Amino acid sequence: MLKVQRKRWKITAFSYLIEKVVRTIRQFIFGTIIGSFLAVLCVRLPRNESLLYPPSHCDFCGQRLRPSEMIPLISALRQKFRCSYCQQKFSPRSFGLELFCGVLCLIFLQDFQWLKLWHLFWLLSTVVLAVIDWDHLIVESKIFWSTGLLLLLSGFLLVPIHWLQPLIICSFFYLSQKILPNSLGLGDLWVVGLWSLFLTGYELLQLLFLASISGLLFFAYQKFRKKTPERLPFLPFLFIGLLIILLKNL
Ligand SMILES: [Zn+2]
């Protein structure tokens, strides 16, 4: 009797483990597909190009990619980050985004909760804004307004809204302009203003602290390499701060 029970328990534990592994792989693959889509967004949106046309192609020779060359992570690894037609080396950024989004989905979709899904959406939309800001030093308005509105509407149901915080942000912006003119763009102000609705005062301070520290460290590193940037995008560093805060809240 005891033996039968033990066997049954082993089978249940084993099937639970298999189910968990399959779910984990599925979440990761889902994340890599999202990452692949976001990589396309980051390139095409600032150029005002359609997301569907022209279909995915090599940036060097223009050759249209076959479905086997568009599998997230695997295609880049198999082709050793080279176009299979012209052999030009392509940027590993798409690979990095696919991997990063895969890991994000793994973390935030582990035990399904609407709040975690909302946090994931917040982070993914910020990834796009951060990459575009890094490349073009702009806050992409189409992504900001569309995802911001969605965040706000769904945020009403999921998190307490701190209506007064945007005022604190405006004061911070005013002060920063007095101390360091043009250190913070108007686009950054809109982003932080929106986010401040969803963060507590302490989290907001943490966000600004983390973003400023990581930005300053990056600036010092670039200066050390004698590649002092004329202007520093702020959104990638805000993203770092937001990521740390949301991971801490998991
Ligand atoms: Zn090519």
Image (cartoon, rainbow, N blue to C red):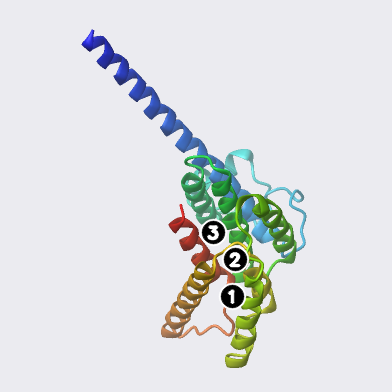
Residue closest to the eye, 204 or 90:
204
For image coordinates 52% across by 63% down, the residue present is: 242
Gap in Å between the C-alphas at discs 2 and 1?
Answer: 8 Å
**Marks 2 & 1, CB-CB < 8 Å contact:** yes
Q: In this rendering, would 40 be left or right of 225?
A: right
Label 1 or label 3, whichever lies nearer to me, is 1
Residue on which disc 1 sits? 233
Residue closest to the eye, 126 or 72:
126
Q: Is mark 1 within 8 Å of ligand 1?
A: no
Mark 2 or mark 1, earlier in chain: 2
Gap in Å between the C-alphas at discs 1 and 3?
Answer: 18 Å
For image coordinates 47% across by 51% down, the residue present is: 80
Mark 2 or mark 3, earlier in chain: 3
Residue on which disc 3 sits? 93
Q: Is residue 100 above or below residue 189?
A: above
The answer, for residue 226, to whether it is visible in the render is yes
Residue on which disc 2 sits? 130
For image coordinates 64% across by 41% down, the residue present is: 66
- Tell me the SS state at disc 1: loop
Kind of residue sitting beneath label 3: Arg
